[in-house]
Image (cartoon, grey):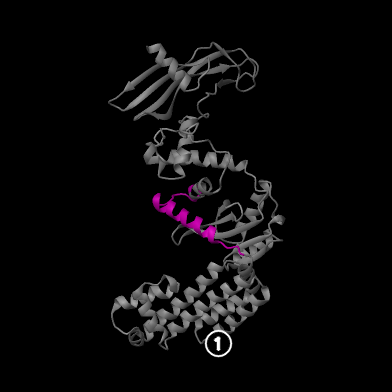
Amino acid sequence: MSNQIEALFTTALGLQPPWHVARVELNTAKRRIDFEVEHTGGRATCPACGVEHQLIHDRVRRSWRHLDFFQFEAWLHAEIPRVQCKGCGKTTQLPVPWAREGNGFTLLFEALSLSLCREMQAAAQMRVAPKRLWGRIRHYVHRSRARDDMSGARYVGIDETSVKRGHEYITVVHDLEAKRLLFATPGRDHATLQAFAQDLRAHGGEPERIEHACIDMSAAYAKGIGQALPKAQVSYDRFHVVALANTAMDEVRREEMRSAAAAVRAAAGTGNKKTLRQLLWAMRKNPPQWTPAQCDAMNWLQRSGLKSARAWRMKQGLRLVYREAAASNCEEVARGALMKWISWARRSRLEPFKRLGATVKAHLGGVLRGMLDGRSNAYVEAMNGLLQQTKTAARGFRKVENFIAIAYLRMSKLEHLPKNPLLPAIARDYGRYRHVCC
């Protein structure tokens, strides 16, 4: 029976002569199973120069963590032969078929860890030190990205996301058509796009073939696009432009609450703080999403002569301009509607909106393209949100390299990573109900 078990595990591990499982030890108290693997040959091919039938000089004992066997940790142990070669004069350790050289995990264990790292905190689930796991992630991400093809990239979205709140940022570049992350690097200045152009060339792409770049109103990114992506047309993401209007509206509201709190409470019809809070959230939301309480609060606001009411109307007016531009799909109509809004903003006597009107006018071409081409950074923003969720789940990243590695692993759709060994080889039927008519 013992020989049958060892032969079974030799086959299950995919070992070929002269490698075989010599002994299996199960320790239920320690909840682990150990496999002793042996190399039975007396001679081997030199790994350094390829000369065959060289004498084995000595053996070095090594251990590797393998996939769990039921609820038990599984470990492989072997005395690895070292070959003394007469051809090259070197003494070299033989490679093993189940692991990378100098690595304490088997290839299958690494493949599973990569799959889990896409979804959860894998280190705790797999009972390994996070530092060791990060090294494997960076290795496989780097190896897979080296074979990545970016030649089809034409339309990109560029944005920043924080690694540490208020301290450190990375720039991310996404392919808006393929819906995947192309590049991530520390910083948020114009040099990050020069680094992207170099990385694009290294992966079969050409910066001159990038036709469109969608960004927020970042002067640094606009400068970087002009230098590194010379033929790319810049469009300013509509969500960022409307977000600027929301920021201007909030600035007006806060200033009015500081300087004329009594007038705001009178406009709301009550001094109740809850009603004022309803007013705060209603001003930030679209009218179809208002609750009944928020509808009541906004009715009071719109009948008032408050600056906050004018600021809200101007924010909604900008949204209307975007809707008209999308409906008409005509640059002349969009330009006319936007210029009217800019004129309204600059005559509004509301300083935040006067500044916003000047900003929009200074970036008029890019704002119009953002209105008409139908592309936006909504996908990029969604991916940044997922990255921030990952950062929260991981309780932060000590190194920016780890943050970038997990971004590539989760969002680059890399095709050359090891496959998850737990995925079924064929479709499964069991566990499903089937109704058979007699």
Residue 60 seen by the camera: no
209 and 336: which one is in front? 336
**Residue 380: x percent and y percent?**
54, 58
Q: Could you tell me which residue is drawn at 41 percent across and 52 percent down?
A: 396
Q: Is residue 48 left or right of residue 81?
A: right
Q: Residue at x 49, y 38 (%)?
A: 136
Name above or below for residue 244 compared with residue 406.
below
The kind of secondary structure the magenta stretch mainly shows is: helix
Query: Taking 288 as reference, is 171 above or below it?
Result: above
- Residue 47 visible here: yes
Counting other residues with Cα less than 10 Å from the Cα at mark 1, is it few (<14), some (14-19), or many (20 or more)? few
Residue 135, position as x, y percentages in the image: 48, 40
| Magenta span contains residue 298 | no
Q: As drawn, is 54 to the left or to the right of 3?
A: right
Disc 1: which residue:
347
Residue furthest toward the front?
438
Residue 7 x/y as whole percent: 44, 15
* Residue at horizontal 56 percent and vertical 61 percent from the top: 377
Res 360 quadrant in image: bottom right
Q: Amino acid at mark 1?
A: Arg
Please give the range of residues in magenta. 374-402
Q: Position of residue 381 (x, y in %)?
A: 51, 60
